[in-house]
Image (cartoon, helix red, strand yellow):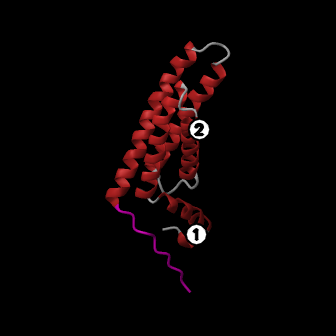
Amino acid sequence: MTTTTERPVVSRRWDHIGRGVMAFNSVLTFAVFVNGFFLMAAANDDRLMVEGWRTFGYFVFSAMWALLAFRPRQVPGIWELVLFHKVAASVLAFSIIDTVEGAQSSISDPWVALSTAFAYVACRGWLSWGSLKRDKDPALVA
Protein backbone atom coordinates (compact mmCIF):
# COMPACT_ATOMS: atom_id res chain seq x y z
CA MET A 1 0.00 0.00 0.00
CA THR A 2 1.45 3.33 -1.00
CA THR A 3 0.49 6.64 0.43
CA THR A 4 0.65 9.73 -1.72
CA THR A 5 0.41 13.14 -0.26
CA GLU A 6 -0.21 15.94 -2.66
CA ARG A 7 1.33 19.20 -1.62
CA PRO A 8 -0.84 22.29 -1.97
CA VAL A 9 0.05 24.57 -4.85
CA VAL A 10 1.51 27.90 -3.85
CA SER A 11 1.33 30.68 -6.41
CA ARG A 12 4.89 31.59 -7.36
CA ARG A 13 3.96 35.26 -7.85
CA TRP A 14 2.25 35.60 -4.44
CA ASP A 15 5.06 33.62 -2.81
CA HIS A 16 7.63 36.08 -4.18
CA ILE A 17 5.54 39.06 -3.08
CA GLY A 18 5.14 37.67 0.44
CA ARG A 19 8.83 36.83 0.68
CA GLY A 20 9.69 40.32 -0.52
CA VAL A 21 7.52 41.88 2.17
CA MET A 22 9.26 39.75 4.82
CA ALA A 23 12.69 40.69 3.44
CA PHE A 24 11.67 44.36 3.54
CA ASN A 25 10.59 44.02 7.18
CA SER A 26 13.87 42.28 7.96
CA VAL A 27 16.02 44.99 6.40
CA LEU A 28 14.04 47.79 8.03
CA THR A 29 14.22 46.12 11.43
CA PHE A 30 17.95 45.56 11.03
CA ALA A 31 18.38 49.30 10.44
CA VAL A 32 16.41 49.97 13.64
CA PHE A 33 18.66 47.45 15.42
CA VAL A 34 21.77 49.40 14.34
CA ASN A 35 20.15 52.66 15.46
CA GLY A 36 19.47 51.01 18.83
CA PHE A 37 23.17 51.13 19.65
CA PHE A 38 23.06 54.93 19.38
CA LEU A 39 20.02 54.98 21.66
CA MET A 40 21.84 52.72 24.12
CA ALA A 41 24.87 55.03 24.09
CA ALA A 42 22.64 58.03 24.84
CA ALA A 43 20.56 56.29 27.51
CA ASN A 44 21.04 57.03 31.18
CA ASP A 45 21.87 54.19 33.55
CA ASP A 46 18.23 53.69 34.53
CA ARG A 47 17.17 53.11 30.89
CA LEU A 48 20.19 51.19 29.60
CA MET A 49 18.73 47.73 30.26
CA VAL A 50 15.44 48.64 28.58
CA GLU A 51 17.18 50.12 25.54
CA GLY A 52 19.52 47.12 25.32
CA TRP A 53 16.64 44.65 25.59
CA ARG A 54 14.78 46.51 22.86
CA THR A 55 17.86 46.76 20.63
CA PHE A 56 18.65 43.05 20.86
CA GLY A 57 14.97 42.26 20.26
CA TYR A 58 15.17 44.15 16.96
CA PHE A 59 17.97 41.83 15.88
CA VAL A 60 15.88 38.77 16.79
CA PHE A 61 12.87 40.06 14.85
CA SER A 62 15.06 40.97 11.88
CA ALA A 63 16.38 37.40 11.88
CA MET A 64 12.88 35.92 12.18
CA TRP A 65 11.63 37.96 9.21
CA ALA A 66 14.72 36.86 7.26
CA LEU A 67 13.90 33.22 8.06
CA LEU A 68 10.34 33.78 6.89
CA ALA A 69 11.58 35.44 3.69
CA PHE A 70 13.92 32.58 2.82
CA ARG A 71 12.01 29.58 4.20
CA PRO A 72 8.34 30.57 4.62
CA ARG A 73 7.01 27.02 4.76
CA GLN A 74 9.82 25.37 6.69
CA VAL A 75 9.75 27.26 10.01
CA PRO A 76 6.64 26.17 11.91
CA GLY A 77 5.52 28.49 14.65
CA ILE A 78 7.60 31.53 13.68
CA TRP A 79 4.77 33.13 11.70
CA GLU A 80 2.38 32.77 14.59
CA LEU A 81 4.87 34.01 17.19
CA VAL A 82 5.68 37.12 15.17
CA LEU A 83 2.00 37.80 14.50
CA PHE A 84 1.09 37.38 18.17
CA HIS A 85 3.83 39.72 19.32
CA LYS A 86 3.13 42.42 16.76
CA VAL A 87 -0.63 42.36 17.30
CA ALA A 88 -0.11 42.53 21.09
CA ALA A 89 2.39 45.38 20.68
CA SER A 90 -0.08 47.22 18.42
CA VAL A 91 -2.86 46.91 20.97
CA LEU A 92 -0.52 48.22 23.68
CA ALA A 93 0.64 51.09 21.46
CA PHE A 94 -2.94 52.18 20.76
CA SER A 95 -3.78 51.96 24.45
CA ILE A 96 -0.94 54.39 25.30
CA ILE A 97 -1.09 56.45 22.10
CA ASP A 98 -0.90 59.69 24.09
CA THR A 99 2.74 58.93 24.97
CA VAL A 100 5.72 59.44 22.63
CA GLU A 101 6.56 55.73 22.46
CA GLY A 102 2.91 54.78 22.03
CA ALA A 103 2.48 57.22 19.16
CA GLN A 104 5.62 55.96 17.42
CA SER A 105 4.73 52.30 17.92
CA SER A 106 1.15 52.87 16.78
CA ILE A 107 2.59 53.34 13.29
CA SER A 108 5.37 50.75 13.11
CA ASP A 109 3.85 47.79 14.95
CA PRO A 110 0.53 47.76 13.05
CA TRP A 111 2.51 47.97 9.78
CA VAL A 112 4.58 44.90 10.57
CA ALA A 113 1.54 43.07 11.97
CA LEU A 114 -0.48 43.72 8.82
CA SER A 115 2.40 43.08 6.43
CA THR A 116 3.26 39.83 8.20
CA ALA A 117 -0.39 38.73 8.09
CA PHE A 118 -0.48 39.58 4.38
CA ALA A 119 2.71 37.59 3.72
CA TYR A 120 1.38 34.71 5.84
CA VAL A 121 -1.54 34.42 3.44
CA ALA A 122 0.52 35.12 0.29
CA CYS A 123 3.15 32.50 1.21
CA ARG A 124 0.66 30.11 2.79
CA GLY A 125 2.67 30.19 6.00
CA TRP A 126 0.34 27.75 7.75
CA LEU A 127 1.77 25.02 5.51
CA SER A 128 4.98 25.21 7.54
CA TRP A 129 3.33 22.96 10.11
CA GLY A 130 3.31 20.20 7.50
CA SER A 131 7.12 20.18 7.60
CA LEU A 132 6.89 18.60 11.06
CA LYS A 133 4.89 15.69 9.69
CA ARG A 134 7.22 15.24 6.72
CA ASP A 135 10.21 15.17 9.09
CA LYS A 136 8.67 12.30 11.08
CA ASP A 137 7.55 10.19 8.14
CA PRO A 138 10.37 9.49 5.65
CA ALA A 139 7.81 8.37 3.05
CA LEU A 140 6.46 11.92 2.87
CA VAL A 141 9.82 13.59 2.23
CA ALA A 142 10.10 14.43 -1.42
Q: Nearer the viewer, residue 42 or 98?
A: 98
The percent coordinates of residue 25 (x first, y second) are: 43, 40
The residue at 63%/12% (across/down) is: 44
Q: Amino acid at mark 2?
A: Leu
Label annotation for residue 5: none
Does residue 132 sit above or below 118 in this rendering? below
Q: Is residue 142 magenta?
A: no
User: Helix or strand or loop: what does disc 1 sit on?
Assistant: helix
Marked residue nearer the N-terminal end (2 or 1): 2
Q: Amino acid at mark 1?
A: Pro
Q: Nearer the viewer, residue 36 or 131?
A: 36
Q: Main secondary structure of the magenta part?
A: loop
Residue range highlighted in magenta: 1-11
Residue named by callout 2: 92
Residue named by callout 1: 138
Gap in angstroms between the C-alphas marked 2 and 1: 44 Å
